[in-house]
Image: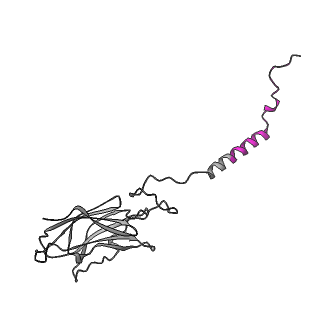
Amino acid sequence: MQTSAVPDLAHTHNRPVHWLATAAAMAGVVAVAGLLQPGDATASQSPSGKAPKPGRTAAVAPAPDPAEVELPLECGGVPGRVVRTVTGDLDGDGGPETVVEARCEAGSGTPPSGIYVLAGSRDGGPRVVATLLATADKASVEDIALSDGVIAATLLGYSSPEVPSCCPDRRERVKWQWQGGKFVRTSGEAGSQSL
């Protein structure tokens, strides 16, 4: 009898016990892999560049709707109206806020504007969290924008009470940014200018 140079491979015969053991091992590997999945990834980043605070869910509430809140306009019985809105994350918490420019309806002249910040409340409804510009300041808003958590606006005003309300004669570029738990106002490099 001639001996084989190849070792005996008797243990390689397929038996049902081997198939059951292999299937059980594969099921265990798949189960463990399912438990070790990474968390959900998101494709968005907050405008401030900061990650949302831990514990936040992936779903973000919509920006607050100004139609659902009473703005602190003092119009003396004349209706008020929202002129424009901009939305974005102002405080870096991952949720959007709404910046609202509103003013009273006026038959003539340039009515003063107010600028308000709306945020969602715990019960889900919007609320006014800050007044950036009050109508008592007697300024109107030429433009307003929001970028990287900074609100920028051009305000039109008056150099004296004798200037007619139709014709503001001062222009000022201002910015507001959330710092230290409040909105901080700064003026543009040129400050206030005469028109």
Residue at the spot 10% in from the left edge and 77% down from the top edge:
162
Identify the main secondary structure in magenta: helix
Q: Position of residue 108 (x, y in %)?
A: 13, 75
The x, y position of residue 93, in whole percent, is: 43, 63
* Residue found farthest to the top: 2
Is residue 10 within the magenta segment?
A: yes
Residue lying farthest to the right in this orientation? 1
Left or right: residue 125 compared with residue 66: right
Q: Is residue 20 left or right of residue 32?
A: right
In-front residue for pair 131/105:
131
- Using the rendered view, name the quadrant where residue 90 is placed: bottom left
Quick check: 149 left or right of 40?
left
Which of the 4 quarters of the picture holds residue 25? top right
Q: Is residue 61 magenta?
A: no
What is the number of callouts on the image?
0
Q: Say which quadrant the N terminus sits in.
A: top right
Identify the residue at horizontal 50%, vertical 62% (top origin): 57
Q: Most extreme residue toward the bottom, as rendered?
A: 76
The quarter in which the C terminus is drawn is bottom left
Q: Is residue 33 left or right of residue 178?
A: right
Q: Which residues are magenta?
A: 3-28
Instruction: Locate residue 146, reporting x and y percent.
Output: 31, 61
Q: Place residue 166 in its image quadrant.
A: bottom left
Q: Is residue 163 above or below residue 60?
A: below
Residue drawn at (59%, 51%) of the image? 37
Against 95, is 27 above or below?
A: above
